[in-house]
């Protein structure tokens, strides 16, 4: 197949074949190819018939976002019980209460940073990067300010 997109019909079923084009070329090529069909199909790509986006144009596409969009679109023509059950399961999972636990920063048992990153009373010290950065979150009068290796040199 040399064309990016080709169209053929088999009885009442139309087949659009796409030969892996770059994403931006796909919409135009599908539309151009399908106009040659005896009964051109309605083509929906980024927006639906009411000019509402089918998927967001930003962020990332998690599988359940894509599944919801596909089920919504396909359900206009046929009911797919397994897809409906999957969406119900996703809804049940997302409705569960979320438990957020916050772990306190801590050095490993026996780590020399446990004592070496504790500032003397009334003083403020600078931390470098790496393990010393954790001391800034531990209420030890430690601030960020130097590169690795220069800790204590200010």
Image (spheres, grey):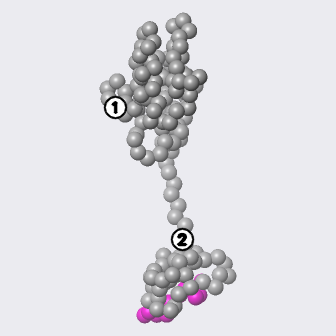
Residue 29: x percent and y percent?
45, 26
Residue receiving disc 2: 104
Pick whichever, 9 or 137, lies toward us: 9
Which numbered dot is residue 121? none
Q: Name the chief secondary structure element in magenta.
A: loop
Hey, which quadrant is residue 58 in on the image?
Answer: top left
Task: Give the quarter of the figure containing the N terminus.
Answer: top right
Q: Residue at x 44, y 14 (%)?
A: 36
Is 124 displayed left or right of 107 in the figure?
A: left
Magenta stretch containing residue 118, yes or no? yes
**Crowding near pointer 2: few (<14 within 10 Å), some, many (20+)?**
few
The span picked out in magenta is: 114-123
Query: Which residue lies under the disc numbered 1?
Result: 52
The answer to whether residue 33 of the structure is visible from this angle is: yes
Front label number (2 vs 1) = 1
Q: Tell me: residue 101, above or below residue 62.
A: below
Mark pair 2, 1: CA separation: 45 Å
Quarter-of-image position of residue 39: top left
30 and 112: which one is in front?
30
């Amino acid at each position: 197949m040399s064309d990016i997109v080709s169209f053929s019909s088999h009885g009442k079923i139309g087949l659009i074949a796409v030969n892996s084009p770059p994403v931006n070329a796909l919409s135009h090529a599908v539309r151009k190819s399908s106009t040659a069909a005896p009964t051109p199909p309605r083509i929906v790509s980024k927006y639906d018939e009411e000019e509402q986006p089918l998927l967001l144009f930003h962020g990332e596409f998690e599988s359940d976002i894509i599944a919801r969009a596909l089920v919504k679109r396909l359900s206009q023509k046929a009911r797919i019980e397994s897809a409906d059950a999957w969406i119900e399961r996703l809804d049940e999972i997302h409705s569960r209460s979320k438990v957020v636990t916050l772990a306190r920063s801590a050095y490993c048992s026996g780590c020399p940073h446990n004592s070496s990153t504790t500032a003397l009373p009334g003083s403020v010290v600078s931390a470098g990067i790496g393990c010393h950065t954790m001391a800034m979150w531990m209420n030890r009068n430690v601030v960020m300010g130097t590169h690795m290796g220069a800790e204590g040199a200010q």
